[in-house]
Amino acid sequence: MPHPVHRQISLLLLTLASGSLYAAECLVPGAHGEEVDAWLPYRVSAENPFTATADRLSGQAQGTLTLDGNVQLRHGSTELRTDQAQLNTQTLRVSSAGQTSIRTPDLQVSAENFDAELNSDQLLVEQASFELPNADHYLRGEAERLEYTDAGTLDMDGASLTSCPPGATFWDLRASSIQINNATDTGTARDVRFEVGGVPLLYLPWLSWPLSDQRKSGFLYPRLASSDNRGLELNLPWYWNIKPNFDATITSRLMSKRGLQLRNEFRYLGPRSKWTVNYDVVNDRSYGDVRQQFELKQSGRPWPGWQTEIQVGNVSDSTYLEDLSENAEIANVTHIDRRIDVRFSRRRINTLLRLQSYQTLDTSLAESDRPYRRLPQLLVAGSLWDPTGPLELRLDSELVKLERDDSIETVRLDLRPRLTYEHFRRWGYFSAAATLAHTRYWLDNATDSQSTRPERTVPILSFDSGVKLRRRNADGSTATLEPRAFYLFVPRVDQDELPVFDSGLNDFSFDQLFRENRFSGRDRIGDANQLSLALRSRHTSAEGREIWRYGVGSSFYFDSRKVGLDDETSELTRSDIVAEAVYSGLRNWQTRATAQLSPDTGELSRSGLDLRYRKGATLINLGHRLDRGRFEQLDLSFARNLNTDIALLGRWQYSLDDDRHIERFLGFAWDNCCWALRGGARHYLSGGETYQNAFSLEIIFKGLGGLGNSVGRQFERAILGYKDPY
């Protein structure tokens, strides 16, 4: 007969620092006159203690103990609570009756009947409910049979799984068997039935997913979309983790108007380079033929000082991107770049070898308006002489073969030695540069009136100086005043006989005031006798935060400029006035403004105004752009959390000169603890002529891994400053 004891008798098996052992004050049959050490489990120690508490205790100290009432067993980081339990003191095997719960760092289990070995972290339970509290996303479920092993593997039969809280189960994954492997952060299931709101939506014979953000083969989140070009579409991406440095994403894209498209992305990360290969193919029933897209990207550092970059793309037809691309910006491109770059840097010499061509998508472009191929182009720039002191001799050179169908072609050599003098102090600087630009052509397909070996030599002389005046205010803030003067002299050299291969007129801007050539490329060097004056100012707080900055400047021409791309001549004596200002003095707000206006009439030729607000997850962007004679546009975008679950996003882009919308976009994101739903609708101008409509919808089931970023990328493109949380 068990001896009655007082409530909350405690059995404590714990090795103290002194090495002595203490048992609870209770009467245990068979324990009198025996050494307590004899019935301790051999794995119990000060580092791995065992304690047991209960209202009543009976049994054999060296065998099986019966614990009744408020039973609590602890061994290391494992804790078991129940009303009644049988404990084998030699193996720490526990069998319980009644409602029982057990907690480990990785698992919480509740069941009516328990059979567990606390000393080995083994567990076998029937009709159990469980929680995985330490996963990246909370998971819980139920199982007809649950077994937990020493290896950290949870095997379940007749199980269900969800990340939704009790009483609010939106989705369930039900399967004949589920395995949770904490060692590999992997979940697998067989005979899977996926239910939403209790309604079965999908059956899969097998499913695997990552338990964390680690890469793992499996399905990613599906996405629904609709557009005028493609109709209703369903995107089902599958991620394949081939090797730690090699993976693939294969997406089945079913479009009601065009058919099934397979989209394949392969990524490889080598010890000194990374590669990406994209290949998409569709038998387009609307187009009436097979259509394909291929893209190869590479970047690497094969040896010290060497860099490589490859970007090669191709589409099967000129309207492929317009019909099938989800990115409106990409859909409107006119050329696909194909380029291979090899760079080498050693000491102060930088070298670039480039092979570059294009695929022209806009077939309406005349051949004379298409870019030239560079096959090849060699650029070498660096310091030739740099003694101690302010002087330095540099060289900038190019050798390129320019090709285009039915056009004049050439090999062009451009050499530009440059001698510079620089003198810097904390309060200001002065620099001077003298450049001799020599260019020679070897022309093919030239007209009879053209020389096949034209050349040009142009000296360039420039002086640049600036002063930085600083004032510290009484509140600790700092204000600066920074005047700058830049003088440029380039004599007029007749260049009318030189063809134009890759030169164009640079957009006028604040930075253009201090450049030595108003043309891009190397076919034209603008004549100049001009002085550019500018004034900048900055104001920073005592903590170093910029409050505002502004700049204003203009160029004064002492001679008319006669070198142009055609036969134009400029008689202006002064450039437009350019100004820019940024104000960040209000918390969460920033304002930026740029302006270019005529000094004679005061009329704006170009301007830009941006107002930005950011506080937490709330974003507001308001912009205005003016380029007189070309466009005037308004741009408004925002992202706003309506409450803790729902966010609204949108963009409105409007052409004031054409009085029409360019893009209207409205999106939403609904997010709670176990799932998220995101979608958007777009009405946008395609190709500058017709409007297109597009819709997308993406559902994310948290805890099943994968990256829901298709809709997120649309949000990022539409809203400046928005970052996709997935």
Image (cartoon, rainbow, N blue to C red):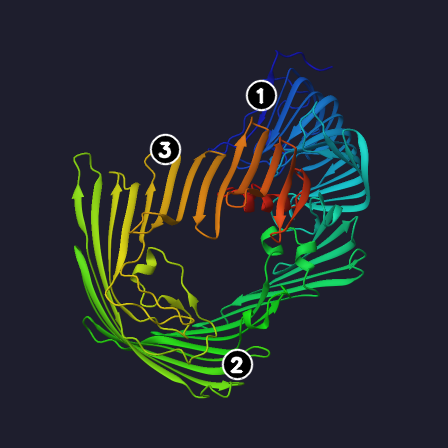
Camera-side residue: 628 or 333?
628
Q: How many marks?
A: 3
Camera-side residue: 630 or 140?
630
Q: CA distance from mark 2 to mark 3?
A: 58 Å
Asked if residue 14 shows in the view, the reply is yes
Q: Which numbered mark, 3 or 1, is in the foreground of this view?
A: 3
2 or 3: tag closer to the N-terminus: 2
The amino acid type of the residue labelled 3 equals Arg
- The label on residue 306 is none
Camera-side residue: 115 or 330?
330
The amino acid type of the residue labelled 2 equals Ile
The amino acid type of the residue labelled 1 equals Ala
Instruction: Return the x and y of residue 260 as percentages of the image width and height.
Output: 79, 54
Q: Which image quadrant is residue 484 in?
A: bottom left
SS type, badge 3? loop
Instruction: Return the x and y of residue 442 as percentages of the image width and height.
Output: 46, 86
1 or 2: tag closer to the N-terminus: 1
Residue drawn at x 27%, y 39% as measured from the top left: 543
Tell me the quadrant of the picture where the N terminus can be found.
top right
Q: Which image quadrant is residue 95 in?
A: top right
Asked if residue 150 shows in the view, the reply is no
Q: Which residue is mark 3?
A: 587
Q: Which residue is mark 2?
A: 408
Q: Which numbered mark, 2 or 3, is in the foreground of this view?
A: 2
Instruction: Return the x and y of residue 346 as percentages of the image width and height.
Output: 38, 75
CB-based contact (under 8 Å), mark 3 and mark 1: no
Task: Decide: is 270 above or below 66.
Answer: below
Residue drawn at x 66%, y 54% as measured from the top left: 325
Residue drawn at x 34%, y 65% as measured from the top left: 570
Q: Which image quadrant is residue 404 in?
A: bottom right
Instruction: Return the x and y of residue 28 as percentages of the image width and height.
Output: 66, 20
3 or 1: tag closer to the N-terminus: 1
